[in-house]
């Protein structure tokens, strides 16, 4: 059953009216399948109206799994001694990025743990070498670094930066990322914006101890910071972390956060996350029908990819080009040919 009030709130959100924090929480915390359907269908409609049927692909190269941080949720955390560590050479990373371009991917995301071996200068060299003879857009996702690093990388030609805020609860953030503060992460996100990066952020859904109120706060933060891209993925349990006994996030709850974010933020780029695909065979497909318009194929060479185990099962669900094209066209959508920068609805 769909409550009248639920219809009303979804309708007013779709029409662009501002939702209060209580309204967001109300939409988020439904337990009714039919209400969820209304939410997902509305998000799909808003997606179609605001960003169209094109699906943007971003090739992701996971170039180092060394990490100085100790996030409780992540398999790359420094105290996970069971993990085989690797670092791709600069030449290997450049080759992977150029391959992405020749496969028709307009954007390459260079991601790693927080690895100090990759100094400011080495990353500059990487950006310059990639940009030398390709026009691929470069997204960096290498964690929290200094303002001077972000500045130097922007000047070297980096286009975008992906840094999830993870959770808008400062208490949860502090508990899950020892020694780190939410405020520092938000400061980094403001700097990136000031420096002219297109900024991607996002959260995890279903972290131990996370409430619907916390998730509603995540959505408010997305609105406040006007991110260009927002990655919303379920938390996945990794057995070699302190959260081994916790439960993974649920797909439907993740999709509710995604759908509300689409309805409210309208023209942002929202990926169907890999984690959704690991949680459920149809997870990415369902995300594509609940507001998502981006997919991030993993183009890390397979011998490294299997060791980039942020959570288990990641490497298993890699979609090859054929499977990806099938999935997208079966949804009546098409792969975009450009770099997929955010185009704000008002500039269309
Ligand atoms: N070190 C960088 C980038 C690599 S981690 C950083 O932390 O920003 C990339 C993302 O993986 C993180 O932002 C986090 O949201 C996600 N992640 C880490 N552990 C996860 C888990 N167990 N389940 C789901 N997502 C996870
Ligand atoms: Fe390192 Fe990022 Fe994993 Fe935290 S989430 S341990 S910073 S790779």
Image: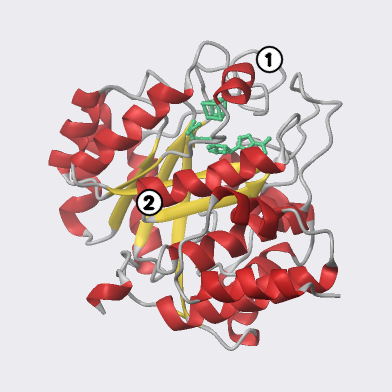
Is 346 displayed left or right of 333 in the figure? left
Q: Which mark is residue 81?
A: 1
Q: Residue at x 84, y 65 (%)?
A: 32
Q: Is residue 25 visible?
A: yes
Q: Is residue 272 visible?
A: no
Is 160 displayed left or right of 195 in the figure? right
Image quarter where the N terminus lies is: bottom right
Q: Residue at x 61, y 50 (%)?
A: 22
- Vertically, is 155 above or below 120? below
Query: Which of the two marks, 1 or 2, is nearer to us in this view?
Result: 2
- Quadrant in the picture for residue 41: bottom right
Q: Residue at x 21, y 36 (%)?
A: 153
Q: Which mark is residue 214?
A: none
Q: Residue 113, position in %: x, y?
A: 49, 28
* First in residue order: circle 1 vs circle 2: 1
Q: Which mark is residue 227?
A: 2
- Quadrant in the picture for residue 129: top left
Measured Cα–Cα span from mark 1 to mark 2: 35 Å
- Vertically, is 20 above or below 86? below
Q: Residues within 10 Å of mark 1 (few under 14, many from 20)?
A: few
Say how the picture is coloured. Answer: secondary structure
Q: Residue at x 58, y 30 (%)?
A: 169
**Dot 2 lies on which element?**
loop
Of 139 and 41, nearer the camera is 41
- Quadrant in the picture for residue 73: top right
Is 65 displayed left or right of 119 in the figure? right
């Amino acid at each position: 059953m769909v409550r009248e009030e639920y219809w009303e709130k979804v309708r007013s959100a779709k029409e662009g009216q501002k939702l209060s924090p209580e309204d967001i929480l109300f939409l988020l915390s439904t337990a009714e399948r039919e209400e969820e359907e209304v939410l997902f269908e509305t998000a799909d409609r808003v997606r179609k109206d605001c960003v169209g049927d094109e699906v943007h692909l971003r090739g992701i190269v996971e170039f180092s799994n060394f990490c100085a941080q100790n996030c409780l949720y992540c398999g790359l955390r420094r105290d996970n001694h069971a993990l085989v560590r690797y670092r791709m050479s600069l030449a290997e990373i450049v080759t992977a990025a150029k391959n992405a371009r020749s496969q028709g991917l307009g954007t390459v995301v260079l991601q790693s743990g927080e690895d100090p071996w990759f100094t400011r200068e080495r990353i500059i060299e990487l950006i310059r070498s990639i940009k030398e003879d390709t026009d691929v857009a470069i997204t960096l996702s290498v964690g929290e670094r200094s303002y001077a690093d972000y500045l130097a990388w922007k000047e070297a030609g980096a286009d975008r930066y992906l840094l999830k805020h993870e959770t808008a609860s400062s208490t949860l953030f502090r508990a899950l990322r020892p020694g780190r503060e939410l405020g520092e992460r938000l400061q980094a996100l403001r700097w990136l914006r000031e420096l002219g990066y297109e900024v991607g952020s996002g959260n995890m859904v279903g972290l131990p101890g996370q409430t619907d109120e916390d998730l509603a706060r995540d959505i408010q933060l997305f609105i406040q910071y006007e991110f260009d891209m927002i990655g919303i993925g379920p938390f996945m349990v990794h057995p070699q972390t302190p959260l081994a006994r916790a439960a993974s996030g649920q797909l439907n709850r993740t999709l509710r956060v995604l759908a509300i974010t689409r309805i409210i933020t309208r023209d942002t780029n929202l990926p169907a996350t890999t984690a959704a695909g690991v949680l459920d065979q149809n997870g990415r497909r369902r995300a594509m029908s609940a507001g998502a318009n981006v997919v991030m194929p993993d183009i890390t060479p397979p011998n490294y990819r299997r060791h980039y185990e942020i959570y288990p099962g990641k490497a298993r669900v890699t979609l090859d080009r054929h499977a990806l094209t099938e999935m997208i066209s079966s949804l009546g959508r098409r792969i975009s040919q450009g770099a997929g920068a955010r185009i704000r609805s008002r500039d269309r």
